[in-house]
Amino acid sequence: MLWIGGATGAGKTSISRALAYRHDLQLYNVDHRTFDHQRRVRVPPVVRWDRPPQELVEHFLAYSYDRFALVLADLRALPDTPGAIAEGPFLLPSLLPHGADAAFLVPTAARIRATGAERGQLDVLVQRNLLLAAHIASDAEDWGFPVLLVDRPLDGMIARVGTELSAAIARLPRGGDLAAVRRHENDVLAEQVWLYRASGEAPPGSPPLPFACECGAAGCDAVVELTLDEYEAISAAGDRSPLRRPTP
C-alpha cells in the first residue's frame, strides 16, 4: 500500500490517479467513499460554518479518526494484487501504520486562497484549510513522512511525487485483473454520486463523470466521460464495451 495524503486542493486525486494508471495499480479514493462512510460511521459529520476555524479543524481531525477504521476495512477487501495507492485528505500522518510508504502534499498559502476564491468558499473554510495544511505538514514531519510543497503545475507535481515515491512504487506487487480493478473503481464512483443524489444535497443536472477505461491494457490512462445515468444503463445492459477505449 502507498499512501498520498495532504491538505485540500493539493491535487492529490489527479496525481494519485496518474500514478496508479501509469503503474497499473489500484486506486482507492477516500472522497469517493464519503456517503458510504456516512452510512457506516456512528456519528455522521454535522458542520456548522459559523464556528471558529480552529474548531472546524478539530472537527475534521475527529471525523478523520472515525473514518479511518472504515478506510482500513475497505482496503482489506481489495484484491491482493496489484498494489494500491490510497489517497485523500482524511489520511492523516498520525493514522498511518508505522513505517508506511507515504507522502503528504501541502499547497502554498497563496494556492489555498486562490482555490478558495475559485470555488467560492466561505472565508472561514479558507482559514480552516490554511490551519489544516499547517497541521498536516507538522504532523507528517513529526512522524517522519515526506512533505511536498505544491508549488508548480500539475504535470510537474506528478513528476515530483513519482520521483519521491519511485522506490515505494517499485515495491508494490503487480498482476491481477486490471479490467476488474478499474470496473470496481468505477462502481464505487457511481455509488458515491448515486448516494449524493439520494441525500438531496446534489444540485440539479447530471454532469459527466470521469470513469476509468476498462480495457485492462498495461499503462492505460484513458478516461471515459459518462453521466451517472449513462453508466447505470451500460451496467444494466451488461455490455461494457463503451467503457473500453479502442486500441490506437
Image (cartoon, rainbow, N blue to C red):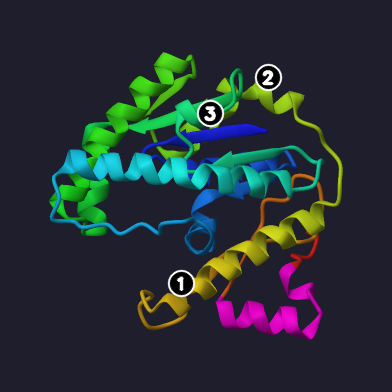
Identify the disc placed on residue 109. none
- What residue sits 43% from the left and 43% below the top? 64
Q: Identify the image quadrant of residue 142.
A: top left
Q: Secondary structure at mark 2?
A: helix
Instruction: Tell me which amino acid carries mark 2.
Output: Ala
Residue 240 is one of the magenta-drawn residues: yes
- Report the span colored magenta: 227-243
Q: Of tags 2 and 1, which is closer to the observer?
A: 1
Report x, y in % for residue 116: 23, 50
**Helix, strand, or loop for circle 3?**
helix
Q: Nearer the viewer, residue 209 or 3?
A: 3
Q: Please state the horizontal and vertical placement of residue 78, each as a whole percent of the image.
A: 74, 48
Q: Mark 3 = which residue?
A: 161
Residue nearest the observer in this picture, 155 or 21: 21
Look at discs 3 and 1 and give the one toward the viewer.
Answer: 1
Is 152 displayed left or right of 55 in the figure? right
Q: Residue at 74% of width from left, 84% of height from top?
A: 236
Up-down relation of residue 25 to residue 192 (above or below) = above
Magenta segment, principal secondary structure?
A: helix
Q: Is residue 27 visible?
A: no
Q: CA distance from mark 2 to mark 1?
A: 37 Å
Task: Tell me which label, 2 or 1, sits earlier in the chain.
Answer: 2
Classify 10 Å Cα crowding around label 1: few (below 14), some (14-19), many (20 and above).
Answer: some
Q: Quadrant of the C terminus?
A: bottom right
Label 1: which residue?
Answer: 196
Residue where numbered disc 2 is placed: 167
